């Protein structure tokens, strides 16, 4: 009978099996820390090694032939799957598990499954060789798959050789994957990959040594025990598998925000390059250290680790402050929220933008108000105190309608409902009570930003237009007086002047009567011009549209020749010319032509009209009205260019102002030049209708000096 004492090396096999089993239990037991995709392949790998070594050790004990065959088959099954499982683990650990599709896993499972099936049925076909029959009977001092086992009585067992060569190649491939991971990794991950590389090379070296230096037992199962010691050392002293290199390669390195990975003891196990400025020491020195001892903002980090949703942190960088929003997020379901990502979002630009907007709001004369969905104030800008006299803190939580004039509240409430229910801004004008009891008129624009997480309310931009409203009210009264009362009185004066002229009075008196009539007629005409301006320019704009100007100018020139038979009219007009303009542009052109003749001091007045493309920009059409009169005084041109009249500088009459305003409505330009040898040229620049679609409104004519 054979005893254990005759084969003391059996102890080595049992020790190897126990060590591999311990590794299996440690990896499976520490589920919360390890990723499932890494944990399960490695646990299956060490379990297979434990089965191989332990079953191989039992073959040295006294047992029946059937038990001996059972352990031999069990050892074969454990050994057959190890190379394939090792390759699968290596790919998963290196982050290349995208290669392990269902079809690929099926292909990899074919060879070990066939090898196990051939072993179980070897008695019927003998393809694995007679040496692998009842091992004790055939070779009482060798119970292993070794170099000598490859040769039976008739030569090499080719099926067995093919199986060993395939397994060796697969195992080498797995080791090369780990080696590549070692070269790509850094810091603690390089050390971890180094331990795995050593643990994988040891069995390969043992298998190679068996071919050249045969041992009494197969050294590969014993070498698995040595590899298990290496793995246990790496597990407990170097945090093996805490965070696999895939976390750095696939996630951390690609993130622009600073990221620190923490284990369940809040120690740093990985970080990306962006986190270096937030760590108190170099990254390599911080790995494995408690995060609160390694970051520059420990209080903010402690707050988010304690459960706060987020925290604001400020880090000084070269004399300037950088702002970060700190958040703690679980790494994923595989870690059951025990391993966490500490993310530092760089919000420096957003913070600076917010400060700029805050400075604009706090220094603006406009009143900015934010309302919730119920119409209650959640924010009011400081300008409220200066404009209406109220302290902003006292208004928070108060309904906005409380300060609105009672007669305007229903209309304002309807406007607020319109803002809440719709997207476009809503404009309204209403009265608001000042703290001193007076009523101020405000123009307000409301915008719905309830869905904007940064605002979460309805924003009102209100401007005090009380002075403008009073000015417009006074202007309307003065306009009425000028248009109606003055006109009626002037008609009375004209009537009396006509009566005087009909009477037989001295010639000198008739001259006075004619002067009275001429001046009264001028005032009546001024009133008519004012009325015309009021009725045309105060109406809402009809919008710009294509206008054919040549036909309209032709009609006006025909009327001019009838009204001024002594005048000479020159025409330089194309067949047609289309411009983009307001429908009042014809009136502006008529005023310019009339002005060229009415104020002409020549016996034979001349006027010429030219329509052509601009020489400096093909996008514009120029209408030139030239005369031989005295020209427009420089003082009036200066007033027209500045857009402002003074008591000392003003334009006689309203005609030029009317022309300027109409051309402005058409996004056109008006300028004057001298005519040779005498007179002036009025140049109206309008955008060509066939070019308007390709250019924005309000452009300027290149190379021209234009009025504003």
Image: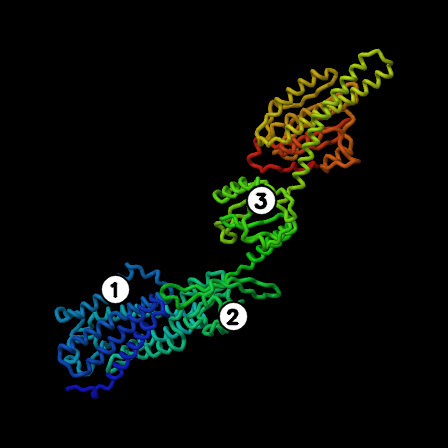
**Quarter location, residue 689:** top right
- Between discs 3 and 2, the one toward the N terminus: 2
Residue 414 vertical position relative to residue 243 in the rendered view, above or below? above
- Between discs 2 and 1, the one toward the N terminus: 1
Q: Are marks 2 and 1 in contact (CB under 8 Å)?
A: no
Do we see residue 677 in this rendering? no
Residue 217 vertical position relative to residue 100 in the rendered view, above or below? below
Q: Which mark is residue 109?
A: 1
Residue identified by numbered label 3: 404
Residue identified by numbered label 2: 298
Residue 307 as seen in the image, left or right of residue 393:
left
The spot of residue 186 in percent (x, y) is 45, 70
**Quarter location, residue 487:** top right
Residue 24 as seen in the image, left or right of residue 478:
left
Distance from label 3 to label 2 (Cα)?
50 Å
Observer-nearest of 696 and 422 = 422
């Amino acid at each position: 009978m054979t005893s254990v004492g005759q084969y003391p090396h059996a102890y080595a096999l049992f020790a190897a099996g126990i060590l591999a089993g311990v590794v299996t239990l440690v990896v499976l037991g520490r589920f919360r820390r390890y990723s499932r995709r890494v944990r399960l392949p490695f646990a299956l790998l060490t379990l297979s090694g434990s089965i191989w070594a332990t079953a191989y050790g039992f073959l040295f004990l006294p047992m029946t032939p059937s038990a001996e065959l059972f352990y031999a088959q069990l050892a074969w099954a454990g050994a057959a799957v190890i190379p394939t499982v090792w390759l699968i683990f290596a790919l998963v650990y290196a982050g290349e598990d995208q290669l392990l599709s269902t079809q690929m896993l099926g292909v990899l499972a074919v060879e070990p499954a066939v090898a196990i099936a051939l072993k179980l049925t070897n008695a019927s076909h003998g393809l694995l060789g007679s040496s692998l029959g009842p091992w004790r009977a055939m070779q009482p001092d060798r119970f292993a798959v070794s170099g000598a086992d490859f040769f039976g009585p008739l030569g090499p067992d080719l099926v067995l050789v093919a199986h060993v060569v395939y397994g060796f190649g697969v195992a080498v491939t797995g080791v090369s994957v780990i080696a590549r991971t070692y070269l790509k990794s850094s810091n603690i991950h390089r050390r971890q990959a180094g331990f795995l590389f050593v643990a994988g090379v040891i069995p390969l070296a043992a298998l190679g040594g068996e071919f050249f230096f045969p041992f009494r037992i197969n050294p590969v199962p014993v070498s698995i025990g040595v590899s298990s010691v290496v793995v246990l050392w790496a597990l407990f002293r170097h945090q093996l598998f805490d965070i696999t290199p895939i976390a750095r390669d696939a996630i951390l390195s690609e993130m622009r925000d600073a990221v620190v990975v923490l284990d369940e003891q809040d120690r740093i196990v990985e970080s990306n390059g962006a986190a270096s400025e937030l760590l108190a020491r170099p990254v390599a020195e911080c790995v494995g250290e408690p995060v609160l001892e390694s970051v520059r903002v420990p209080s903010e980090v402690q707050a988010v680790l304690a459960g706060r949703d987020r925290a604001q942190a400020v880090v000084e960088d070269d004399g300037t402050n950088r702002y970060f929003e700190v958040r703690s997020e679980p790494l994923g379901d595989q870690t059951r929220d025990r391993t966490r990502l500490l993310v530092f979002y760089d919000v420096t630009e957003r913070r600076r933008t917010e400060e700029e907007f805050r400075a604009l709001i706090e220094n603006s004369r406009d009143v900015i108000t934010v309302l919730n969905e119920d119409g209650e104030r959640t924010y009011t800008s400081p300008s409220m105190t200066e404009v209406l006299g109220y302290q902003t803190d006292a208004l928070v939580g108060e309904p906005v309608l409380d300060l609105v004039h009672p007669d305007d509240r229903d209309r304002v409430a309807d406007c607020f409902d319109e803002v809440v229910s719709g997207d476009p801004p809503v404009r309204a004008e209403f009265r608001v009570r000042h703290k001193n009891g007076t009523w101020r008129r405000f123009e307000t624009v409301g915008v719905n930003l309830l869905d904007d997480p940064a605002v979460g309310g309805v924003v009102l931009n209100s401007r005090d237009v009380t002075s403008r409203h009073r000015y417009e009210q006074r202007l309307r009264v003065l306009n009425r007086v000028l248009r109606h009362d003055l006109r009626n009185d002037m008609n009375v004066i004209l009537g009396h002047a006509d009566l005087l002229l009909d009477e037989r009075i001295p010639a000198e008196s008739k001259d006075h009567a004619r002067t009275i009539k001429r001046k009264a007629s001028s005032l009546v005409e001024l009133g008519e011009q004012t009325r015309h301006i009021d009725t045309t320019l105060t109406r809402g704009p009809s919008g710009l549209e294509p206008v054919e100007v040549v036909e309209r100018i032709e009609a006006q020139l025909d009327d001019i020749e009838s009204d001024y038979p002594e005048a000479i009219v020159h025409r330089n007009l194309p067949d047609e010319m289309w411009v983009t303009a307001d429908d009042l542009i014809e009136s502006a052109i008529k005023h310019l032509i009339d002005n060229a003749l009415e104020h002409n001091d020549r016996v034979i007045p001349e006027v010429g009209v030219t329509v052509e493309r601009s020489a400096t920009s093909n996008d514009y059409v120029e209408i030139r009205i030239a005369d031989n009169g005295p020209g427009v005084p420089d003082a009036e041109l200066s007033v027209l260019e500045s857009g402002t009249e003074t008591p000392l500088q003003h334009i006689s009459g309203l005609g030029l102002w009317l022309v300027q305003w109409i051309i402005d409505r058409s996004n056109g330009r008006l300028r004057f030049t001298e005519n040779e040898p005498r007179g002036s040229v009025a140049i109206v620049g309008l955008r060509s209708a066939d070019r308007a679609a390709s250019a924005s409104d309000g452009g300027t004519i290149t190379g021209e000096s234009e009025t504003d």
